[in-house]
Image: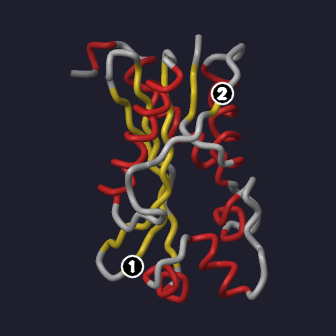
Amino acid sequence: MNIVIGSTSPAKLKAAQITLDKLFPKVKVKSVKVDSGVGDQPTSDKESIKGAINRAKWAQKKANADFGIGMEGGMNKIGKLWFECGWIAVVDKNGKVGLGSSGRFEVSGKIIKEIIKGKELNEAVDTIAGKTVVDPKKGFMSIVTKRNLSRPVAYSHGLIFAFAPFLSDPKFWD
């Protein structure tokens, strides 16, 4: 089986490998660089989902893989609060799409002000901290959870959900 992720991000690659080790133990994730087709820091679920699907479709096509994986982290405003969430898409050779997401966490107003100025999440956090504090292998999720939950682990849950239409009984899906 050939599975490819449309990203070179260390955290996203780790999330994919954690998931593949559970679902398809002998498959190793391959990566290709693709564009998301959305802004560098999506600010809605709609934009993040579009970016994840684009990455998955373009990765699958570029590698002629059995499955393409796309992951796109983004912000979403709910009422007066902003939340970060990772959206994950899986696309097969026939164009069938599965979607899942990580859990959400609230992002402070200080960080959102930097994002509105055009910065990506990690860049905004590092600006506020005055130094590099976000480990690209673990993500900001690791910082806000006092290293109890890393981005790769959180995204792996969403990826398992994105694979659900391909793993479970077809009678549960359209």
At label 1, the amino acid type is Leu
- Left/right placement of residue 7 relative to residue 95 reads right
Q: Position of residue 75 (x, y in %)?
A: 43, 67
At label 2, the amino acid type is Lys
Residue 12 versus residue 65 in the image, above or below: below
Q: Position of residue 27 (x, y in %)?
A: 68, 17
Q: Quadrant of the N terminus?
A: top right
- Left/right placement of residue 123 relative to residue 167 reads right
Q: Position of residue 62 (x, y in %)?
A: 49, 26
Residue drawn 32% across the image and 22% down it: 95
Q: Which residue is mark 1?
A: 81
Residue 112 versus residue 58 in the image, above or below: below
Q: Position of residue 110 (x, y in %)?
A: 54, 89
Please, what secondary structure does the residue beneath circle 1 have?
strand
The crowd level at tag 2 (other Cα within 10 Å; few <14, some 14-19, many 20+) is many
Q: Which residue is mark 2?
A: 30
In this view of the protein, which residue sits in the foreground, 61 or 21?
61
Residue drawn 38% across the image and 41% down it: 54
Q: How is the image coloured?
A: secondary structure
Residue drawn 68% across the image and 60% down it: 139
Which of the two discs, 2 and 1, labels the residue nearer the N terminus? 2
Residue drawn 42% across the image and 44% down it: 52
Residue 115 versus residue 29 in the image, above or below: below
